[in-house]
């Protein structure tokens, strides 16, 4: 059986991980967000820039994050993203949904052992 593509695994969860990263670390540029998620995943996830920026655009359009230009550590111009009040509310709701969903998946996967 073929393993799922990373985009399949991340669909619906990348937005949540980005919101959590911005909540925890404060304003970050897109590259920094991607590298932080990869680092926390212990390199299980490898994010391409296009996927991250598509999610950032979607979150921005939904009012969950705000963006402004700044200067990165290496002196280059970069867009920095920060979580908004709407994003904080969505993060709370989506975190609860994820906990509930992952709990269900865990119970289903343990079914055979309980029989």
Image (cartoon, rainbow, N blue to C red):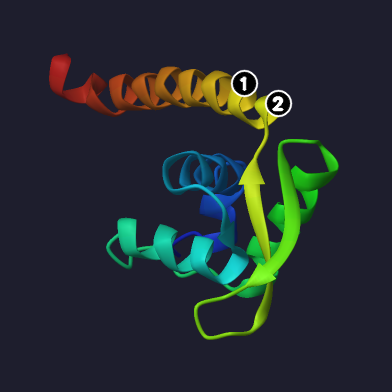
With respect to residue 40, does 74 lie above or below? below
Q: If the image is split into quadrants, where does the C terminus sit?
A: top left
Residue extending furthest toward the top: 115
Q: Position of residue 33 (x, y in %)?
A: 52, 60
Residue at horizontal 54%, vertical 52%? 10
Q: Position of residue 60 (x, y in %)?
A: 78, 46
In the drawing, what numbered circle is on residue 86? 2
Mark 1 Cα shell of 10 Å, populated few (<14), some (14-19), many (≥20): few
Q: Secondary structure at mark 2?
A: helix
Residue at horizontal 47%, vertical 18%? 96
With respect to residue 62, does 21 lie above or below? below
Query: Which of the 4 image quarters holds residue 107?
Result: top left
With respect to residue 58, does 99 lie above or below? above
Q: Secondary structure at mark 1?
A: helix
Asked if the residues shown at circle 2 and circle 1 are in contact, with their CB atoms under 8 angstroms apart, the answer is yes
Q: Would you say 98 lies left or right of 54 here?
A: left
* Residue on which disc 1 sits: 89
Q: If the image is split into quadrants, where does the N terminus sit?
A: bottom left
Q: Position of residue 83 (x, y in %)?
A: 62, 39
Residue 103 at least partly seen: yes
Q: Would you say 93 lies left or right of 103 here?
A: right
Mark 2 Cα shell of 10 Å, populated few (<14), some (14-19), many (≥20): few
Residue 5 at least partly seen: no
Query: Which of the 4 image quarters holds residue 63?
Result: top right
Q: Position of residue 14 (x, y in %)?
A: 57, 49
């Amino acid at each position: 059986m073929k393993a799922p593509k990373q985009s399949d695994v991340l669909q619906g969860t990348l937005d949540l991980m980005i919101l959590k990263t911005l909540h925890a670390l404060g304003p970050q540029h897109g590259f920094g967000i991607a590298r932080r998620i990869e680092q926390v995943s212990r390199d299980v996830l490898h994010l391409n820039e296009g996927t991250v920026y598509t999610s950032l655009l979607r979150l921005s359009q939904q009012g969950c994050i705000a963006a402004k230009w700044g200067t990165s550590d290496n002196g280059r111009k970069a867009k920095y993203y920060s979580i908004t009040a709407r994003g904080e509310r969505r993060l709370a709701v989506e975190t609860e949904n994820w906990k509930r969903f992952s709990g269900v998946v865990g119970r289903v996967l343990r079914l055979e052992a309980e029989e």
